[in-house]
Image (cartoon, rainbow, N blue to C red):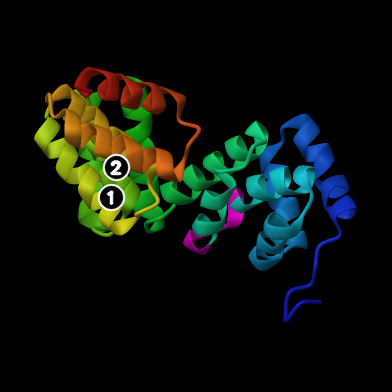
Amino acid sequence: MIGTVRIINEAEFVSKVQPALARQDWDLLHQIIRTNWTADQLLHLLRHGGCDARKVAALAIGMVGGNCALTLLAKLLQDQDPIVVEMAEHAMWQIWFRGGCADANRLVARGAEALNMQDVDRAMEHLNRAIAMAPDFPEAYNQRAIAFYLSEQHHESIADSKRTIELMPLHFGAWAGMGHCFLASGMLAEALDAYENALRINPHLQCVAELAQEIRERTKG
């Protein structure tokens, strides 16, 4: 015991979740996690567990964790193990997507699905409703920023990205998206600053790193 947190046995933890992972049965995995461990226990394992346990703990936190887990997950984005980074990044996105009330979360998910199908108008309808319902929901603004970007409304996209970052400073996706808008608008210094902020949070964004380097080469001298 540490304080009120009962430490998870790593071998038992991996053993219990392995069958669901092997079958990719995410509903069963979610049930196992909810039944056996608290979010505080998972966070402790994320801090102190071995590599394999931390990977699975990050996956679990993505399913059941909240905003309090984001700072720790962001630290894992600096990890040298690419799977740890992938799991931490995925967990952060999962938490971001459920950052509003239940109805707003569903609207943002539908908006993201519409964006994936290039149906920007439908996405806008969902995202505007989500923002009206939950005006402090960072991911609603981030997804709407993407919709504005796809519509080449860069000023509006930048405004929504800034609002996302005000509400969620660790949102590397919003920093990167804002950089894309600045770049498309020919604002190279602003684009580079946004890209560098994204990379400070998540240094494994390869496309962003390449764009930042291209800007440096274009502007040097």
Q: Position of residue 37 (x, y in %)?
A: 74, 62
Q: Along the line of sight, which residue is nearer the eye, 138 or 194?
A: 194
Q: Is 64 or 142 nearer to us in this picture? A: 142
Residue name at image x 34 percent, y 54 percent? 169
Disc 2 packing (10 Å; few <14; some 14–19; many ≥20): many
Q: Quadrant location of residue 120?
A: top left
- CA gap between label 1 and label 2 equals 6 Å
Kindly state the secondary structure of the residue where label 2 is placed.
helix
Amino acid at circle 1: Thr
Q: Residues within 10 Å of mark 1 (few under 14, many from 20)?
A: many
Q: Residue at x 45, y 30 (%)?
A: 205
Q: Which residue is mark 1?
A: 164
Q: Left of 73 or right of it: where is 212? A: left
Q: Are marks 1 and 2 in contact (CB under 8 Å)?
A: yes
Residue at point 73%, 81% (across, down): 3
Which portion, as a residue range, is magenta? 62-68
Relative vertical location of residue 23 with respect to residue 159 in this rendering, above or below: above
**x, y (%) of residue 42?**
69, 59
Task: Determine the main secondary structure of the stretch shown in magenta.
Answer: helix
Residue 16 appearing in the image: yes
Q: Which residue is mark 2?
A: 142
What amino acid does circle 2 point to? Answer: Asn
